[in-house]
Image (cartoon, rainbow, N blue to C red):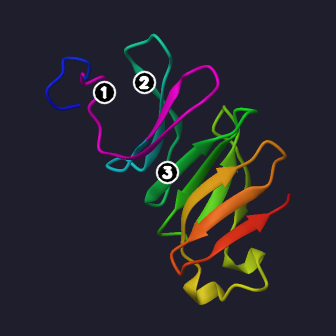
Amino acid sequence: ILGTNSAKVIFKVHAMDLAVDKQKNLYLIDSSNSAILRLRSGKNEYEVVVSNLSYPTAVFVDGNDFIYVVESYQSQVSKYDQAGQKIWSLTGNSFGSVDRTSWAPTHVFVDDAGAVYIAHRGGLVLRWLP
């Protein structure tokens, strides 16, 4: 916030997006290294949680601490556990009503019931029930 002393730099990274889990850990997309970083609450160092991504642009952490990532170059949304292991991925082929050649997810949100909402560059919002 300009003009106040309340804002301070806590981490220097080319962050595309960020999310906070229920333990107040901060998750950042490090677009320079195509990775998801976790800065644990109260700590001054980060750890790589997910790496080797294909241009990640959005991250979300649900109430069960699963990490959801939108990868623009792969045009997919993936779910990871806290160890960085991929659980599943959604692509344009996952939705019969979406033209897979124009599939372009931009953001992801998961509600408390586990429904996955995906914002799509083409103006769509999709809901997937795993």
124 or 56, nearer to the observer: 124
Percent of width and height locating residue 124 = 61, 77
Q: Quadrant of the C terminus?
A: bottom right
Q: Check residue 24 in the rendering and tell me which mark sits there, or answer none.
A: none
Going by the numbered disc 1, the residue's amino acid type is: Phe
Q: Secondary structure at mark 1?
A: loop
Q: Is residue 38 above or below residue 114?
A: above
Question: Disc 2 or 1, which lies upstream in sequence?
Answer: 1
Percent of width and height locating residue 102 = 56, 86
- Residue beneath the point at 25% across and 23% down: 7
65 or 111, nearer to the observer: 111
Instruction: Indicate whether residue 72 is drawn in magenta.
Output: no
Left or right: residue 95 versus residue 109 is right
Quickly name the residue at label 2. 46
Instruction: Indicate whether residue 16 is drawn in magenta.
Output: yes
Q: Secondary structure at mark 2?
A: strand
Percent of width and height locating residue 49 = 55, 35
- Residue beneath the point at 46% across and 10% down: 42
Q: Tell which residue pokes out farthest to the left in this image.
A: 3
Q: CA distance from mark 3 to mark 1?
A: 21 Å
Quickly name the residue at label 1. 11
Percent of width and height locating residue 122 = 53, 81
Quickly name the residue at label 3. 52
Q: Tell me where the magenta segment starts and ends, as one range.
A: 8-28
